Amino acid sequence: MKAELLAPVGNMESLRAALACGADAVYIGLGEHSARADAGFSREMFYAAVTQAHAAGVRVYLALNILFTDRELSRALADAASAAACKADAVIVQDLGLLSLLREQLPDLPLHASTQMSVQTAAGLALLQRLGVRRAVLPRELTRRELAALLRASPIECEVFVHGAHCMSVSGQCRLSAALGGRSGNRGNCAQPCRLPWRISGQAGNRFALSLKDRCCLDEVTAQPLSEAASLKIEGRRKRPEYVAAAVTAYRAALDGKPSAVTKQMLREVFSRQGFTNGYTEGSFQKGDASMFGTRAAEDKASPEVLGFLRGLYKREPIPTPALSAPLPETPNTALPPLPPPAGPGIKPQLWLQTLQPEALPRDISGITRLFLPWNTPADTLCCHAKDREVGITLPGGIFGNYDRVLSVARTAKAAGAAYALCDTLDGVALAREAGLLALGGQGLNLHNSYAFQTAYALGVQAAVCSPELNAAQIRDLKPAIPAVLVAYGRLPLMLLRACPIRAQMGCKACRNSQSLTDRKGIAFPVRCDGLCAVLYNSRPHYLADKVKLCARSVSALLISLTAESQRESERVLERIRSGNTPEGSFTRGSF
């Protein structure tokens, strides 16, 4: 079956370009409820767009791919119901809670899992199938071999990005914009601070260490493995209509085996960042490919002549536009089903401790109920700690093609006394259960509402960390079906990096897992490698241990997460938390 060509639409002019230039399907946001909130349609515009696209034989997918709070879910359901009434062909979802509610209340509406769900393995895709998902949008960070293996093994359809922007972080695992300016990428309002100057602390060289070049797979869309994908996706709902026209024209011609009126140079000019890269596909990021990095430059801007030519690709073909005043179809009622009673917190929340450096643990960790060590901690160290308390491992957020390797290590950890695994993705949840460990949801699972906790419980998750992007009132609203955990202390992970900028400039041997990146204000952010990917952490620790009373009825445990602290610093942190006092030095409350 021929792969679908899927185009981005951020306004009616872009829709016109997509239809005229040969898209098989388009994806559109509605209001503020998509990962590109500033490119969302009104309900009236969406109805007109669906009518126009269907008249041209083109499918329409609604992007509802952000995280929702308890109080926002009814509006999200109403948006999805409106889309279903308009005969939209599918809805793209990130939020686990919304996903389950849609399956229950709109069972005939096909569900697509957003790339922001961070699912990277066949085991994770199998969990999505259990949740009723028909298609998954795969991460951009897969190598050619990993992509081929996933397409062969996937129990559901797979959609693959072939053109457009590369986020530096694995999608769904970025909180940089939320932490630095309160504009969350997981909530559709990313301010792209990664595109500003960043450099390795104390080093000259790359001034834009968190900015990757754009992706371009034009020369390989008809070859394996891309030819085996159900859908080939062009990124860019914020981009101008001329960009949509250029990309759709070029890829349509490539898929049909015909010469194209749009050259790769035109694609570069209409939007790129110092050209294109396929460093993930080729696996060159694993060797520290510095050529993957780039930023907007003067030569990346299209001339008026090129823009005029691209406009001509869709302006010359008249497409009837339905009146925006046309009556909307009746929207079905969507009522929120009752939640199960919450797993009530104890009289006093338990203390959980997570560390990246077992050697820097406080000497006295009495009172710690559960201790989480890195996934690759030696078995004898796990054995030693398991004698005194419940011990778990923290699974890597970026498993990708290393599933069997991590599974083997997790089984060894289980034999050494580990009982739990802290999981940041559905891939981790599946792996933990296969290894015989009890799955606990980490920060990266992005549980943002009560129904997300309920969905996690249905997948076998025993307890989970609340999304660190929730504020106090939103946490109080939670009625979690499993024990909810609050991050009481720790440098929040801001980015999961598969293309490590430090490896690209210095190499791993020179880094020794002790480097940091500095922003344009001179503030340093630690970078630590988990053995598979690097993680960019916040410059200041998150601290809520003295604020627990504000949301205590929803919280069963407090997580203390130690990253770059020395043993003495760790001991002081633990002392302050036990006393319920504010910490020493600089700290942040995050979204709280």
Image (spheres, grey):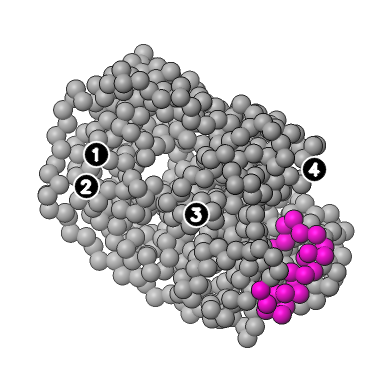
Alpha carbon of mark 3 to alpha carbon of mark 1: how far? 30 Å
Alpha carbon of mark 4 to alpha carbon of mark 2: how far? 53 Å
Question: Could you say which is closer to the camera, residue 546 or residue 369?
Answer: 546
Name of the residue lying farthest toward the top: 259
- Report which residue position mark 3 lands on: 181
- Report which residue position mark 1 lands on: 12
**Is residue 32 visible to the viewer in this orientation of the structure?**
yes
Q: Nearer the viewer, mark 3 or mark 2?
A: 3
Q: Which element carries disc 4, helix, strand or loop?
A: loop
**Label disc, if present, on residue 512 of the rendered structure:** 4
The relative height of residue 69 versus residue 56 in the rendered view (above or below) is below
**Is residue 124 visible to the viewer in this orientation of the structure?**
no
Coordinates of residue 74 in the picture (x, y in percent): 33, 66
> Hey, which quadrant is residue 282 in on the image?
top right
Left or right of 459? Residue 94 is: left
Q: Nearer the viewer, mark 4 or mark 2?
A: 4
In the rendered image, residue 562 lying in the magenta stretch gets the answer yes
Q: Nearer the viewer, mark 4 or mark 1?
A: 4
Left or right of 163? Residue 335 is: left
Marks 4/3 in contact by CB < 8 Å: the verdict is no
Looking at the image, tell me whether mark 4 or mark 2 is earlier in sequence order: 2
Marks 2/1 in contact by CB < 8 Å: the verdict is yes
- Report which residue position mark 2 lands on: 45
Name the residue type under label 1: Met
Q: Which element carries disc 3, helix, strand or loop?
A: helix
Looking at the image, tell me whether mark 3 or mark 1 is earlier in sequence order: 1
Name the residue type under label 3: Gly
Span shown in magenta: 560-582
Name the residue type under label 4: Arg
Question: Could you say which is closer to the camera, residue 547 or residue 297?
Answer: 297
Name the residue type under label 2: Met
